[in-house]
Amino acid sequence: MPNWATFVGLTGVVTLLLLALAYASQSMVATVKEPDSTTEPTAGLLLANVALSQGVLLGVLLAAAWYTQVPLAALGITTDLTTTAALTLGVGLGFVLYLSSELGGATADRLGFEYDEGLRGLLAPDSMGGWAVLLGIVLPVIAVFEEFLFRAALIGAVSAGYGVSPWLLAVLSSMLFAMGHGAQGRTGIIITGLLGFALAAAFVLTESLLVVVLAHYLVNALEFVVHEGLGIEWI
């Protein structure tokens, strides 16, 4: 029998730890941007820190889900969707959300609202090996961890264990998701919150973790490749 209380409690602890790490990242970005700052963390060090911290938290959640016997279906790991359908939906959703994010950022910039991309710039690799690590390790870890936490655990598990409306949980988890991206500025938080709700809605409708993980990965990967790799700016 699933031990919902223990799993949800550990999920809450992991969420608080993630928000604390996000606040630390926000403070670090602000420090680096100061004119007299002598702090220049390398992209490699930052990538390793992100992959390690989120990888450890992901491991904690996975171990908690196994120990508390949370059903795989509640987490969106087993679903009625075929793998092909999930991949197709994930890729399609990823491209749509990427274009929507770009449009939102460009519109905000034209209206004079700040959309801070400093953290993305700091994480951008300066070598082919760095890009391989970013696209092949770091971004997949981020996508799997954040979707497992904000969608599978905070929506799927809580809804299955306590009968709470998944749409209410989608709103609440999206707010927490936005708070975890404070380094992008107020406008970035709003855009990220909307992006998070779109991913949450996709999870509720498809009941598939694979769909939202793939979409999340594509959004992040396309932003890095287009802006930091190719140097393309849409505005």
Image: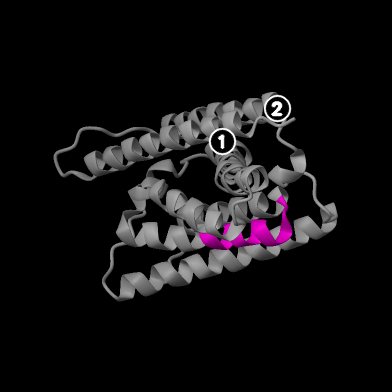
Q: Camera-side residue: 22 or 125? A: 22
**Residue 193 visible here:** yes
Report which residue position mark 1 lands on: 8
Does residue 35 lie above or below 170 as drawn? above
Image coordinates of residue 226 in percent, x first then y, are 52, 59
Magenta stretch containing residue 7, yes or no? no
Mark pair 1, 2: CA separation: 13 Å
Identified at 42% across, 35% down, the residue is 16
Q: Image quadrant of residue 206?
A: bottom right
Q: Image quadrant of residue 111?
A: bottom left
Does residue 91 lie above or below 67 as drawn? below
Looking at the rendered structure, the kind of residue marked 2 is: Trp
Identified at 34% across, 48% down, the residue is 183
Image coordinates of residue 194 in percent, x first then y, are 47, 63
Q: Is residue 103 left or right of residue 77?
A: left
Does residue 193 lie above or below 150 as drawn? below
Q: Camera-side residue: 159 or 67? A: 159
Looking at the rendered structure, the kind of residue marked 1 is: Val
Does residue 82 lie above or below 53 as drawn? below
Image coordinates of residue 3 in percent, x first then y, are 66, 30
Q: Residues within 10 Å of mark 2 (few under 14, many from 20)?
A: some
Give residue 66's mark: 2
Magenta stretch containing residue 198, yes or no? yes
Q: Can you say which quadrant of the picture contains the N terminus?
A: top right
Q: Residues within 10 Å of mark 1 (few under 14, many from 20)?
A: many
Question: Which stretch is magenta?
Answer: 197-208
| Mark closer to the chain start, 1 or 2 | 1
Q: Secondary structure at mark 1?
A: helix
Image coordinates of residue 201 in percent, x first then y, are 61, 62
Q: Secondary structure at mark 2?
A: helix
**Residue 118 visible here:** no
Considering the whole magenta stretch, tell me its main secondary structure: helix
